Image (tube, helix red, strand yellow):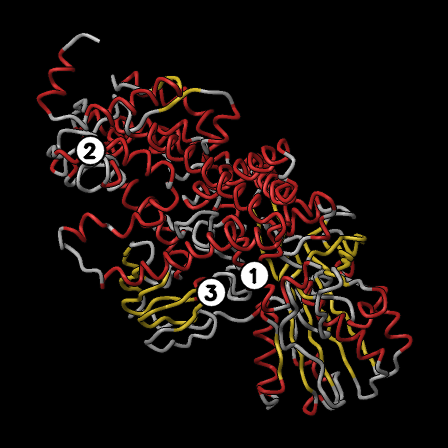
């Protein structure tokens, strides 16, 4: 990581705080209108998808219904749920958009998400051993994890994780790696498991039992469409998230580096541990503005549609302090993620040999 | 049809599973409100059907609540919620119309004075238009007419007249025959709210006596004194209702106390609920917001809502004066003092209102 001394870190902190304060002072009707418009779009897509689905025996309708429901889930998870739970809209004092009571359309319960994501991931971003989102305990993405032959197959793990992403996220807090190492007991995880089965059961019931049975004669079509919609969401959201932290230049940190760190150091870690991808407004909406992952990590509780507006200012701050602002096209960033998963599946010797060769 | 999703228990359960929310019918609100704001389910909507000028700084807003609003008794208050620059704000006002009006034509009125610097009252005066909608809570409050007729004395000051108007209207409609006196204190005659209605009542209702005192009319201000009370016949047998600014209420309470009128025959509304004198030496303490993982130490008479906000938390809140319970929250341990009553809570788990609870020693909050 780029090293800054205490005075430089303090200056970085002040520069970023100034950007934040400017947005906070300007929050108002425009932000409320934006999020309400997105919520309206979500409702229209979800209701449209559910209503069309039983007519899915007509192939184009099946495609439209599945796409509509898939888009609805993506928008709800990425632009509404994730952002609302960060408290981005708490200032509106609208109980439907409040971080502590919002429950989203995915297996992971909001309670569990707020603990593992808002607290652990956003506090200990990319700190190996502390940020459990780094590789989700199933992928080796750096040489700080000792290689073993099982890692050769980690591309299969990756495929499974991305296809079943909502279940993976739902089970994230189970901390299976720590259970395996017997650092924690199954008994301590019972309250979590109860919560997981309640929320997971609710989601499975809705998409895989209730709506198919409601339209019994065409149940297989509705079931297939609902599975398809969930799959679309799983693939997209996992890809967006992977592009945010596992790209080539996204840095990792050690626990020692971060002991007693200042706010300035935390800011620096967020800037260097995250990566953006470019795209049009539709891509930004569908990614919940995590295409501006750097801005999101620096200011997780500012309304996400503001990230695009403050991005030039954040870039200017990075330039001033000589910090690399990691941004590239979606395809380019995703390609480096896939490469990283592939490279670190190999034994270190082989990997270093390959890396030494000019590409 | 959506009300079924609220009232029918199995359907409500199903709705929760399908929409991941405690109020499943409100899932459709974003679409319904773009068709008609009165179709919203999250709260009871009310449409502004008229706005009348009472005085230079007081207006009466005529509202037509949606049919599912449960109604009220004369003298009660409601919370209203309006959105200003993207922020929802809750305030409590007295209903100034009689319940009979609501039964007959479905409208209620709020009579609201501009408060200097008041965000909501000024916005309502400047921006609220007929045709707009706002959220209306269910009525509450125990500033109610007596169950059996007995002589009454109302002492009102300024906009404190509003719940009294509702009561007088209702009593007059019932042909209340025991004597009713209103001592109404205003700065000048021009500040009399609902002057026309009061004079009509005086003309058509023989039991009613009206005295308007313009405190600033003379060279020296004329405040409530024994002379005013001496004009009320049989005052010691009267049930008394007080509503107005704190100074007037304090005076009235003192004068009535000296006339040996029993405290349980004196009713006052929350507008003037005096802040209780809090013990000052042992307030504050370590406050742990458990779910947020934040612990802060608080000093003095800061309430938990302010403590939480100072710690960068954003709990739900409403009136910030102990009325609306939007900020109700579970206290898992510790003692808090209710700022309104001065009473201490028990040490165990219970629901408290963040906006009026002052910690006394270490407190753990489920927030």
**Residue visible at 26% across and 59% down?**
A189
Q: Residues within 10 Å of mark 1 (few under 14, many from 20)?
A: some
Question: Pointers 3 and 2 in contact (CB under 8 A)?
Answer: no
Point out residue B310 in the picture as x, y percentages from the top left corner.
Answer: 37, 51
User: In the rendered image, which residue does mark 1 sit on?
Assistant: B14
* Protein chain holding label 1: B
Q: Chain of mark 3?
A: B
Label 3: which secondary element: strand
**Residue at mark 2: chain:** A
Dividing the picture into quadrants, the one containing residue A22 is: top left
Q: How many marks?
A: 3
**Could you say where residue B223 lies in the image, as x and y percent from the top left?**
65, 70
Disc 2 and disc 1: Cα gap in Å?
A: 42 Å
Q: Secondary structure at mark 2?
A: loop
Q: Which residue is mark 3?
A: B328
The quarter of the rendered structure image containing the C terminus of chain B is bottom left
The local crowd at label 2, few if under 14, some if 14 to 19, many if 20 or more residues have their Cα within 10 Å, is many
Q: Residue furthest left?
A: A349
- Residue A29 appears in the figure: no
- Label 3 and label 1: CA atoms lie apart by 27 Å
Q: Is residue A102 above or below residue B66?
A: above
Q: Nearer the viewer, mark 3 or mark 1?
A: 1
């Amino acid at each position: 990581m780029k090293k800054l001394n205490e005075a430089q870190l303090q200056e970085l902190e002040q520069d970023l705080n100034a950007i934040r304060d400017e947005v906070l002072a300007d929050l108002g009707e425009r932000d409320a209108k934006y999020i309400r418009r997105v919520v309206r779009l979500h409702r229209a897509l979800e209701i449209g998808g559910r209503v069309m689905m039983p007519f899915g025996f007509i192939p184009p309708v099946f495609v439209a219904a599945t796409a509509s429901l898939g888009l609805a889930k993506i928008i709800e998870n990425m632009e509404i749920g994730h952002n609302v739970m960060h408290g981005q809209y708490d200032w509106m004092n609208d109980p439907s958009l409040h971080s502590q009571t919002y429950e989203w359309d995915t297996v992971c319960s909001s309670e569990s998400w707020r603990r593992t994501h808002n607290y652990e991931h956003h506090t200990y971003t990319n700190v190996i051993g502390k940020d459990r989102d780094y590789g989700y305990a199933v992928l080796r993405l750096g040489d700080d994890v000792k290689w073993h032959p099982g890692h050769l197959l980690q591309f299969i793990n990756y495929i499974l994780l991305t296809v079943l992403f909502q279940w993976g996220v739902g089970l994230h807090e189970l901390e299976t790696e720590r259970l395996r190492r017997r650092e924690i007991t199954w008994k301590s995880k019972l309250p979590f498991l109860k919560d997981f089965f309640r929320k997971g059961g609710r989601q499975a019931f809705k998409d895989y039992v209730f709506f198919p049975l409601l339209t019994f004669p065409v149940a297989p079509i509705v079931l297939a469409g609902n599975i398809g919609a969930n799959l679309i969401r799983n693939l997209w959201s996992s890809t967006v998230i992977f592009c945010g932290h596992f790209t080539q230049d996204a840095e990792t940190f050690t626990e020692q580096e971060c002991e007693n760190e200042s706010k300035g150091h935390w800011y620096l870690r967020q800037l260097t541990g995250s990566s953006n991808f470019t795209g049009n407004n539709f891509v930004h909406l569908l990614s919940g503005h995590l295409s501006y992952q750097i801005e999101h990590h620096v200011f997780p509780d500012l309304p996400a549609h503001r990230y695009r507006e403050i991005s030039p200012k954040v870039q200017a701050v990075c330039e001033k302090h000589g910090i690399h602002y990691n941004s590239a096209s979606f395809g380019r960033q995703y390609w480096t993620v896939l490469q990283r998963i592939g490279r670190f599946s190999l034994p270190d010797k082989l990997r270093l040999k390959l890396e030494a060769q000019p590409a | 049809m959506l009300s079924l999703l609220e009232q029918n228990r199995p359907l409500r359960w199903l709705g929760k599973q399908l929409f991941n929310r405690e109020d499943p019918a409100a899932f459709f609100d974003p679409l319904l409100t773009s068709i008609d704001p009165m179709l919203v389910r999250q709260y009871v909507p009310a449409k502004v059907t008229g706005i009348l000028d009472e005085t230079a700084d007081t207006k009466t807003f005529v509202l037509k609540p949606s049919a599912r609003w449960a109604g009220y008794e004369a003298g009660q208050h409601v919370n209203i919620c309006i959105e200003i620059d993207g922020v929802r704000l809750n305030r409590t006002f007295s209903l100034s119309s009689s319940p009979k009006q609501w039964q007959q034509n479905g409208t209620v009125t709020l009579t609201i004075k501009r408060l200097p610097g008041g965000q909501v009252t000024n916005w309502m005066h400047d921006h609220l238009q007929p045709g707009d909608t706002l959220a209306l809570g269910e009525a509450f409050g125990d500033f109610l007419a007596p169950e059996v007729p007995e002589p009454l004395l109302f002492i009102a000051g300024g906009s404190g007249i509003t719940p009294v108007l509702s009561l007088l209207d209702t009593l007059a409609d019932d042909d209340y025959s025991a004597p009713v006196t209103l001592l109404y204190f205003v700065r000048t005659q021009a500040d009399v709210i609902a002057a026309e209605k009061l004079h009509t009542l005086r003309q058509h209702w023989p039991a009613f006596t009206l005295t308007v005192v313009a405190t600033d009319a003379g060279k020296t201000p004329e405040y409530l004194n024994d002379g005013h009370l001496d004009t009320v016949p049989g005052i010691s047998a009267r049930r008394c209702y007080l509503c107005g600014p704190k100074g007037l209420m304090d005076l009235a309470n003192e004068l009535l106390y000296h006339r040996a009128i029993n405290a349980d025959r004196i009713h006052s509304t929350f507008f003037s609920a005096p802040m209780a004198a809090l013990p000052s030496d042992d307030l504050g303490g370590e406050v742990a917001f458990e779910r947020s993982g934040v612990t802060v130490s608080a000093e003095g008479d800061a309430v938990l809502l302010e403590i939480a906000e100072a710690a960068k938390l954003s709990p739900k809140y409403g009136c910030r004066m102990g009325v609306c319970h939007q900020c109700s929250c579970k206290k898992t341990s510790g003692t808090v003092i209710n700022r309104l009553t001065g009473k201490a809570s028990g040490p165990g788990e219970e629901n408290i209102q963040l906006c009026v609870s002052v910690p006394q020693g270490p407190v753990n909050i489920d927030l």
